[in-house]
Image (cartoon, rainbow, N blue to C red):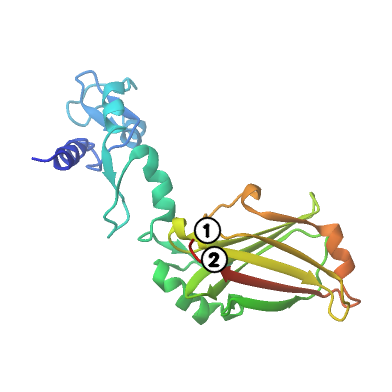
């Protein structure tokens, strides 16, 4: 029997006797050393195996063992196994996970697989899909004193990207980030460039550029490029329009 089969066999033994689900730390034990998962520990006062009163004691030896075992990804169809310390991060970017409709959540309740995202957006939210590597748009009634967030899907170089834009009126900053919807290690193959400009006014422009980031549902300011909102005021015309372009370039591998 090889090592992997042995490890998986141990994981199969670490099954909660009450809910019959694979257990992850913290593990609890009754006075007779029967193990329970944290959910069942919190919802029961006696051990379902022997009827002994539960005391809340942890089985730390078993927890240390579990941290050394390869657990299967919980997403159906995914063949990956990871240590528990790595599994949470993997499930967030697993290609077999279910995606929300990120540009329109929570009002859109669609959930589906990665390969179905683009079709859903084209069917239900076509105004949020940009179909080229270079896109130029006009933001109407743009203001620098109201917080606002938006996300567009960009189809470029045969790949799908998220373009996130977030205005923070308190900090007077605009955050911009582009993410690859796909393998994290391929994100650095692409660079994005954003230009803000005033139409018909040569020299009235600001350009920012950065590497495309791996997809993360909850990106942070540290992932983004920032622009001072006050600097954008000079690009607004009398109709409060801001002209904006986004370009995604493929960077050939060296």
State whether residue 14 is above or below residue 185. above
Residue 237 in the figure: left or right of residue 71: right
Q: Which residue is mark 2?
A: 251
Residue 112 in the figure: left or right of residue 127: left
Residue 210 sits in which quadrant? bottom right
Residue 127 in percent (x, y) is at 61, 79
Taking the spot 20% from the left edge, 26% from the top edge, the residue there is: 34
Q: Are marks 1 and 2 in contact (CB under 8 Å)?
A: yes
10 Å crowding of disc 1: few (<14), some (14-19), many (20+): some
Task: Quote the CA–CA distance across marks 1 and 2.
Answer: 8 Å
Taking the spot 82% from the left edge, 58% from the top edge, the residue there is: 229
Q: Secondary structure at mark 1?
A: helix
Which label number is shown at residue 188? 1
Residue 100 in the figure: left or right of residue 191: left
Residue 125 in percent (x, y) is at 56, 77
User: Who is closer to the viewer here, 211 or 226?
Assistant: 211
User: Who is closer to the viewer here, 24 or 188?
Assistant: 188
User: Who is closer to the viewer here, 77 or 212?
Assistant: 212
Q: Secondary structure at mark 2?
A: loop
Which label number is shown at residue 43? none
State whether residue 13 is above or below residue 185. above
């Amino acid at each position: 029997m090889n090592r992997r089969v042995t490890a998986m066999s141990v994981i199969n033994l670490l099954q909660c006797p009450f809910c019959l689900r694979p257990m992850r730390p913290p593990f609890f034990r009754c006075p007779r050393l029967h193990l329970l998962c944290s959910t069942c520990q919190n919802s029961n006062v006696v051990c379902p195996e022997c009827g002994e009163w539960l005391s809340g004691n942890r089985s730390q030896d078993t927890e240390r063992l579990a941290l050394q075992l390869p657990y299967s990804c919980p997403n159906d169809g995914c063949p990956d196994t990871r240590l528990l310390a790595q599994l949470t991060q993997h499930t967030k970017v697993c290609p077999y996970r279910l995606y929300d409709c990120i540009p329109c959540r929570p009002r859109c309740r669609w959930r589906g697989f990665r390969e179905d995202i683009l079709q859903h957006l084209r069917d239900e939210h076509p105004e949020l899909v940009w179909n080229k590597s270079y896109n130029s748009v006009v933001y109407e009634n743009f203001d620098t004193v109201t917080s606002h967030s938006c996300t567009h899907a960009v189809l470029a170089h045969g790949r799908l990207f998220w373009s996130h834009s977030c205005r923070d009126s308190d900090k007077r900053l605009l955050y911009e980030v582009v993410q690859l919807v796909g393998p994290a290690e391929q994100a650095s193959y692409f660079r994005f460039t954003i230009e803000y400009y005033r139409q018909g006014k040569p020299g009235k422009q600001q350009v920012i550029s950065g590497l495309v980031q791996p997809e993360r549902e909850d990106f942070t300011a540290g992932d983004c490029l920032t622009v001072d909102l006050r600097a954008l005021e000079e690009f607004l015309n009398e109709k409060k329009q801001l002209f904006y372009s986004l370009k995604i370039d493929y960077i050939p591998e060296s």
